[in-house]
Image (cartoon, rainbow, N blue to C red):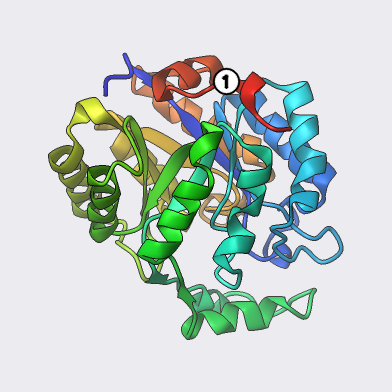
Amino acid sequence: MANKDRVIITCAVTGSIHTPTMSPHLPITPTEIADAAIGAAEAGAAIVHLHARDPRDGRPDQSPEAFAPFLKVIKQRTSVVVNITTGGAPTMSIEERVRPAATFKPEVASLNMGSMNFGLYPMLARYKDFKYDWEKPYLEGSRDRIFKNTFGDIEYILTTCAENGTRFEIECYDIGHLYTLAHFADRGIVKPPFFVQSVFGILGGIGGHPEDVMQMRRTADRLFGRANYHWSVLGAGRNQMPIAAMAAAMGGNVRVGLEDSLWLGPGKLAESNAAQVRQVRQLLEGLGLTVATADEAREILSLKGADQVGF
């Protein structure tokens, strides 16, 4: 679907990919998460994608009680679109993962489109010292852990949230995930316009080569037609900005944030989510594109509006 040259920036503020001690700038407490989300919105993000963490040790926490404090603050202080994860962490049950979205009825929630190997263990070669006792085993465990998203799991999330008016950031880590989306669309369980987030560079999913990016775009075009979906990209780690540039030039939207990459450049940690938003905004505007506001994103994605959420 045409955005009239307006590009939606999503910022993934904190998440389960990275553990706390890999960067001192990763927000962990409710106050840190709220401040980071608001800073990202002020920098130009129309959507903030949110996980929660235990403030004592940064462990992923998918309880509604962990989300409530920062959701209310973000809504009070900014008009940004809130996107609540249903991915949580690969160690969680599907019932646990969907609970915050079912409770708070956000405008957008993420939805993973397939089970996959989710290899985080290569990080162990780069990081030796960990502050918390759960971090190293969590990374090591990804050698044998499946991020489970069966057809039944996906349908469970879609039907659990069906009456909430929530639309989904549909996360596709490989070509087959687009076909899974087409399957559920054919059954009428999810309806267009789809917001397809193509994820590149996670070990176990599609790579970050330009041919991979183009193949994702071509396949989505063929399956859905450009009139029925909005495309966005997420490049993990060092893939973040190069893939954002490629996708923007191809008419796509972009996602950045400390969940996806801790870095602002080679050897330079990003000091905030806002810093990555400013960097990608500069890139987009250098291409002659305009960054969408939160309300423009609501119109483009056919969202229900912030007055219809449950927080």
Q: Position of residue 207 (x, y in %)?
A: 30, 61
Image quarter for residue 205?
bottom left
Q: Is residue 236 visible?
A: no
Q: Position of residue 20 (x, y in %)?
A: 72, 63
The residue under the point 22% across, 25% down is: 227
SS for callout 1: loop
Q: Quadrant of the C terminus?
A: top right
Image quarter for residue 76?
top right
At label 1, which amino acid type do we have?
Gly
Q: Nearer the viewer, residue 143 or 154?
A: 154
Q: Position of residue 186 (x, y in %)?
A: 22, 45
Q: Nearer the viewer, residue 309 or 112?
A: 309
Q: Position of residue 224 (x, y in %)?
A: 20, 37
The residue under the point 58% across, 69% down is: 93
Left or right: where does residue 165 sit relative to residue 61?
Answer: left
The residue under the point 63% across, 75% down is: 127
Q: Quadrant of the N terminus?
A: top left
Judge whether 108 appears above or below 155 on screen.
above
Residue found farthest to the right: 56
| Label 1 CA crowd tier, 10 Å (few <14, some 14–19, many 20+) | some
The residue under the point 80% across, 51% down is: 65
Q: Is residue 239 visible?
A: yes
Residue found farthest to the left: 222
Judging by the rendered image, the residue that carries numbered circle 1 is: 305
